[in-house]
């Protein structure tokens, strides 16, 4: 299975990347860096650094510095000054790919028609830009899996908006519109599903006890920062770890329960801009646009994640 990962790394993004690197059946063919949790320079640095540490060879591309329309907002309070808490990664072993993130989406989809799984766990900026280069993208990908939104559930950024949508609402609206006739429909996993996964001290201990690997130590220290943020935000010494759940669903088809729904992004609301609005009762008289994931088998996923990390980290090469 070939996967393109588009991420704003980010603590839970780093878990998704490491999880994919640990899976023999998943071939990561490209990483697109999207500004979000931290600025583009830092996301790119994190992706290059983690790819180096994990011994991954695929191209890592720089994405847009800013969202399509609004100013960039970042989340150093949540993900730390480096996006990995306070962890500074060693220098990477390579330069970024010379192509833009949008171009990489288009090139890889064209190179592997019908065989590339798109996995978007950050804002949709670069995927939206890629649609301008290759409008056939929805029909070239084998499937698209998105961590984003919240359906009939509170937001984590605005009162009703989720981070990946709130950073670039126009981009996510464009992507959902363009993929509305994709077959299969994209999976849209909102907070209602991903917040079922909550790491506590038990999972923090399990990360620290993974086989010795420099990435294990990065993840442990980053997760401690993530816990401290969640504690300061009223969620206790724990953290919602969204992105690897969606990665695991993309690879295995398990852990998320989906239902076809028409979903659109509110772009004009004075209180609700960036909200994903789902027409559960069919009032719009429009066909479904996504497979909306609104619940998850959290325990089974966590077990799968740690089994994969334990096996994979024991086998991965150890570079600096
Ligand atoms: C999403 O926002 C980011 O902070 C996380 O990495 C995740 O992709 C959750 O709302
Ligand atoms: Ca993310």
Image (cartoon, grey):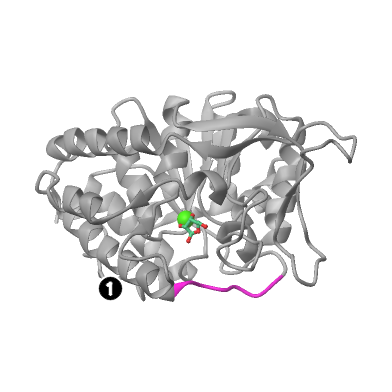
Decide if ligand 1 comes within 8 Å of the CB at mark 1: no
Q: Residues within 10 Å of mark 1 (few under 14, many from 20)?
A: some
Residue 93: image x %, image y %? 25, 56
Q: Which residue is at a point 55% across and 63% down the rendered structure image? A: 156
Q: Position of residue 202 (x, y in %)?
A: 21, 51
Give the residue at mark 1: 86
Q: Main secondary structure of the magenta part?
A: loop
Any part of residue 51 in sight: yes
User: Quadrant of the image for the N terminus?
Assistant: top left
Look at the image and tell me whether residue 143 can be seen.
no
Of 206 and 163, nearer the camera is: 206
Please provide percent x and percent y for residue 152. 67, 50
Whether the magenta-drawn stretch holds residue 77 is answered as no
Q: Is residue 213 left or right of residue 106?
A: left
In the image shown, does 268 or 137 lie closer to the viewer? 268
- Give the answer, above or below, for where 160 lies relative to 146: below
Identify the residue at image location x=40%, y=53%. 13
Q: Residue 145: give x, y in percent of width and height.
A: 55, 38
Q: Nearer the viewer, residue 119 or 320?
A: 119
Describe residue 18's horizontal placement relative to residue 129 as left or right. Answer: left
Residue 143 lies left or right of residue 313; in this view the side is: right
Q: Is residue 242 above or below residue 90?
A: above
User: Helix, strand or loop at disc 1?
Assistant: loop
Q: Residue at x 60, y 69 (%)?
A: 66
Looking at the rendered image, the quarter that the C terminus falls into is: bottom left
From the viewer's perspective, is residue 87 above or below residue 245? below
Identify the residue at image location x=36%, y=64%. Answer: 45
Highlighted range, magenta: 70-76
Q: How many marks?
A: 1
């Amino acid at each position: 299975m070939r996967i393109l990962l588009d991420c704003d790394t980010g603590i839970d993004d780093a878990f998704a990347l490491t999880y994919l690197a640990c899976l023999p059946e998943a071939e990561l063919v490209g990483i697109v860096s999207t500004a979000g949790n931290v600025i583009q320079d830092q996301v790119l640095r994190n992706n290059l650094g983690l790819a180096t540490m994990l011994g991954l060879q695929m191209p890592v591309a720089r994405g847009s510095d800013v969202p399509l329309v609004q100013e960039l907002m970042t989340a150093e309070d949540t993900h730390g000054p480096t996006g990995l808490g306070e962890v500074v990664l060693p220098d990477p072993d390579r330069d970024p790919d010379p192509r833009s993130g949008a171009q990489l989406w288009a090139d890889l989809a064209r190179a592997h028609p019908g065989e590339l799984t798109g996995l978007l766990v950050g804002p949709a900026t670069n995927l939206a830009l890629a649609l301008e280069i290759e409008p056939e993208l929805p029909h070239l990908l084998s499937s698209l899996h998105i961590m984003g939104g919240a359906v009939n559930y509170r937001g984590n950024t605005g009162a009703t908006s989720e981070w990946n949508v709130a950073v670039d609402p126009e981009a996510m609206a464009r992507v959902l519109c363009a993929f509305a006739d994709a077959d299969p429909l994209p999976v849209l996993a909102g907070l209602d599903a991903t917040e079922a996964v909550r790491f506590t001290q038990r999972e923090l201990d399990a990360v620290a006890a993974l086989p010795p690997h420099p990435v294990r130590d990065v993840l442990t220290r980053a997760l401690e920062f993530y816990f401290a943020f969640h504690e300061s935000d009223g969620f206790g010494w724990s953290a919602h770890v969204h992105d690897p759940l969606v990665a695991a669903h993309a690879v295995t088809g398990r852990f998320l329960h989906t239902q076809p729904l028409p979903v659109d992004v509110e772009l004009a609301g004075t209180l609700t801009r960036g909200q994903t609005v789902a027409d559960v009762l069919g009032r719009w008289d429009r066909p479904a646009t996504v497979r909306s994931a609104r619940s998850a088998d959290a325990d089974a996923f966590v077990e799968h994640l740690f089994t994969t990390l334990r096996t994979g980290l024991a086998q991965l090469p150890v570079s600096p």
